[in-house]
């Protein structure tokens, strides 16, 4: 149980002893509150979802900025024919860890993978590992989740809610646990316009839902899912809301912090600008636009694009872990919620994003683009449908015809169908505005020392959006698509070729229209001559009137 009355924590390699003050705050020898890095020194940290996008950045930052941390226990499952050890060792080889590798080539010694499948009973952790974890873990970061918007409800419930409950059960057996940090999402309550840093009543009692879905066939669950999720857009936001409620229920027994990031994007500063490794959220949209595939999407130009860089989220998460732990005895029995968003502090809009993404991909084009990047967003449904037909389906049809004629397998229509499915799922988030209260983020910032504010910076007022978007787009090119920056001249040359193809195509189309309609029909010819003579008359009138005025 973690709500111990007092405790002495040996601050690892710094040799600095920290102790619980009367208020429950962990203080240094001089009575001041320990810094974040000093707090993590000597601590054993358990992380779920460490192989995911945010988990990796969390592991990297802990190792780099809290070098005295004792051990990171990562709950990992084997996947795609790779053992858990192979997966973790591959992860540590990735470029994200370059800076840590430079500082400490032996950093891998601090990482201990623990085999776990979160959807299995007791998280499928072996009894020996349970023993090990319960005897030494000091802080838990729970990042694992399914973030797919089309996840069947049963599976989303299993992973996002039931696994969270099981992890909380495990946490309660831990003898030295000081904080449990749960990663939620700012959109857990997206059925509300204004979202405070509180846990709202759940749409349904989680336990009752779990019990009733257990005996139901998948097809029945699929049929009733829209009724269950109600005014939420998908099973993801719905189950994340239920998970918050499950976490909240344990807050009388554990010290809990809940982080609610909005749309997590590439890194802003750390470990280097623009790091991103997936197609989720806006990244896939940016890439599709940069490749010239996506030309239109439904989004509101004036709606706030609540993107938040991944390093900001992780800095806040680590600071929240520190704050939750050092204040654990003074907390009321309620989880502290941190809305981790940018919209209320440093707003930027989808229209501006579109402009900067497009100009960035013109300066730094992606290789082998399908067409020149020129995506436009519109909130008008009919307009969007029109452009989908003209700019997506028609070119896809022509290209597939070309592939067929040249003996290759047609593929463009299939790509567009998948793209339409993906953007259809994202439109809900790009067409509306939300307002998040972020007082706890400000409160947390005010508790940091000037040094910690620099090392664990989450002050998004300093974020320069155009520069961030430029680095984000370059990041998708370098780290998601593995394209080389030295190939940019060739990519530009390819875009010039595409432009010439378009000019030639448009000219041929004009000639074709001329031949079919104008040259063959007397009426079309008459209309044509009428339009031309009207233009001529207008030009002559315009010229004559401008001569008179002179
Ligand atoms: C310039 C214009 C500016 C426009 C501005 C407008 C931008 C609007 C953006 C709005 C974003 C809103 C996000 C809201 C986030 C809520 C926050 C969160 O809490 S939660 C976090 C947010 N959560 C999410 O974002 C999850 C959303 N994603 C999903 O739910 C699913 O991926 C899916 C249903 C879209 C596709 O399912 P399915 O068809 O089964 O396909 P698989 O998944 O199996 O992937 C197959 C392959 O395709 C790849 N790939 C994937 N996506 C894209 C893409 N967009 N494109 C290209 N490729 C993509 C994928 O890598 C994979 O490759 P490989 O491994 O085979 O090589
Ligand atoms: N990305 C975003 O925009 C946002 C994310 N969030 C939240 O942040 C957290 C992390 O998201 P993100 O890093 O983007 O997600 P990812 O999909 O990149 O990572 C998910 C992680 O969960 C693990 N996981 C999934 N299923 C299981 C399982 N059955 N057993 C064990 N581990 C499992 C994955 O492991 P494996 O590699 O084995 O699949 C992976 O490590 C989530 O809680 C999400 O809700 C909140 C707001 C926005």
Image (cartoon, grey):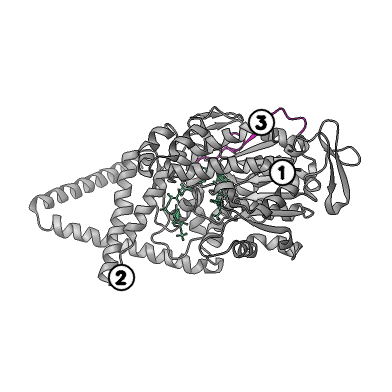
Give coordinates of residue 209: x percent, y percent. 47, 34
Q: Which residue is mark 3?
A: 439
Give coordinates of residue 515: x percent, y percent. 15, 60
Residue furthest out toward the left: 522
Side of 375 relative to 53 (left or right): left
Q: Which residue is mark 2?
A: 408
- Of residue 82 and residue 211, the one placed in the foreground of this image is 211
Categorize mark 3 by other alpha carbons within 10 Å: few (<14), some (14-19), many (20+). some
Give coordinates of residue 202: x percent, y percent. 52, 30
- Of residue 131 and residue 193, the one placed in the foreground of this image is 131
Looking at marks 3 and 2 on the same chain, the residue that comes earlier in the sequence is marked by 2
Instruction: Tell me where residue 368 sits by quadrant.
Output: bottom left
- Of residue 382 and residue 241, the one placed in the foreground of this image is 241
> At 71% across and 45% down in the image, what residue appears?
139
Q: CA distance from mark 3 to mark 1?
A: 31 Å
- Is residue 348 shown above or below 375? above
- Is residue 173 shown above or below 482? above
Query: Element type at marker 2?
Result: loop
**Does the closest atom of ligand 2 sit within 8 Å of the Cβ of label 3?**
no
Q: Is residue 107 magenta?
A: no
> At 75% across and 39% down in the image, what residue appears?
325
**Does the closest atom of ligand 2 sit within 8 Å of the Cβ of label 1?**
no
Query: Which portion, as a residue range, is magenta?
Result: 329-349
Query: Element type at marker 3?
Result: helix
Looking at marks 3 and 1 on the same chain, the residue that comes earlier in the sequence is marked by 1
Regarding residue 352, the answer to whether it shows in the image is: no
Residue furthest out toward the front: 127
- Of residue 302 and residue 26, the one placed in the foreground of this image is 26
Looking at marks 1 and 2 on the same chain, the residue that comes earlier in the sequence is marked by 1
Q: Which residue is mark 1?
A: 174
Mark whose residue sits in front, 1 or 2? 1
């Amino acid at each position: 149980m973690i709500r111990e009355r007092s405790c002495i924590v040996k601050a690892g390699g710094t040799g600095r002893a920290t102790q619980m003050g009367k208020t429950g705050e962990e203080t240094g020898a001089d009575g001041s509150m320990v810094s974040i890095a000093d707090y993590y020194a000597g601590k054993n940290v358990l992380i779920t979802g460490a192989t995911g996008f945010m988990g990796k950045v969390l592991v990297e930052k802990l190792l780099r900025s809290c070098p005295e941390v004792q051990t990171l226990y990562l709950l990992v499952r084997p996947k795609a024919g790779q053992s858990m050890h192979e997966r973790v060792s591959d992860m540590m080889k990735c470029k994200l860890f370059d800076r840590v590798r430079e500082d400490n080539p032996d950093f891998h010694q601090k990482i201990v993978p623990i085999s776990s499948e979160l959807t299995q009973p007791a998280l499928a952790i072996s009894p020996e590992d349970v023993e090990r974890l319960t005897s030494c873990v000091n802080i838990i970061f729970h990042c694992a989740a399914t973030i797919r918007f089309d996840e069947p409800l049963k599976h989303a419930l299993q992973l996002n809610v039931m696994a969270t409950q099981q992890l909380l059960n495990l946490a309660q057996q831990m003898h030295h646990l000081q904080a449990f940090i749960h990663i939620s999402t700012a959109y857990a309550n997206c059925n509300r316009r204004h979202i405070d840093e509180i846990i709202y009543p759940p749409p349904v009692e989680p336990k009752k839902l779990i019990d009733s879905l257990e005996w139901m066939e998948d097809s029945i669950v699929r049929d009733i899912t829209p009724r269950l999720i109600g005014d939420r857009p998908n099973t993801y936001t719905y189950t994340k809301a239920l998970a918050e409620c499950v976490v909240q229920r344990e807050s009388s027994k554990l010290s809990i912090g809940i982080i609610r990031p909005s749309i997590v994007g590439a890194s802003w500063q750390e470990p280097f600008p623009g790091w991103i490794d997936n197609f989720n959220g806006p990244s896939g949209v940016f890439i599709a636009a940069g490749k010239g595939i996506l030309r239109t999407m439904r989004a509101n130009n004036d709606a706030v694009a609540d993107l938040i860089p991944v390093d900001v989220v992780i800095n806040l998460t680590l600071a929240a872990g520190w704050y939750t732990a050092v204040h654990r005895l003074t907390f009321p029995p309620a989880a502290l919620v941190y809305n981790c968003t940018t919209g209320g502090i440093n707003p930027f809009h989808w229209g501006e994003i579109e402009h900067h993404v497009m100009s960035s991909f013109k300066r730094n084009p992606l290789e082998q683009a399908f067409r020149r990047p020129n995506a436009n967003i519109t909130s008008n449904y009919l307009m969007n449908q029109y452009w989908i037909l003209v700019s997506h389906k028609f070119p896809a049809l022509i290209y597939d015809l070309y592939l067929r004629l040249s003996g290759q397998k047609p593929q463009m229509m299939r790509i567009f169908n998948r793209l339409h499915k993906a953007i259809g799922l994202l439109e809900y988030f790009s067409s509306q505005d939300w307002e998040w209260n972020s007082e706890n983020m400000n409160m947390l910032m005010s508790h940091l020392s000037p040094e910690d504010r620099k090392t664990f910076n989450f002050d998004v007022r300093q974020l320069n959006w155009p520069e961030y978007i430029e680095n984000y787009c370059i990041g998708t090119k370098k780290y998601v698509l593995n394209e080389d920056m030295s190939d940019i001249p060739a990519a530009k040359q390819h875009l010039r070729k595409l432009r010439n193809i378009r000019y030639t195509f448009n000219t041929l189309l004009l000639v074709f229209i001329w031949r079919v309609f104008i040259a063959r029909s007397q009426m079309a010819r008459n209309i044509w001559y009428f339009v031309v003579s009207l233009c001529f008359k207008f030009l002559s009138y315009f010229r004559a009137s401008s001569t008179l005025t002179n």
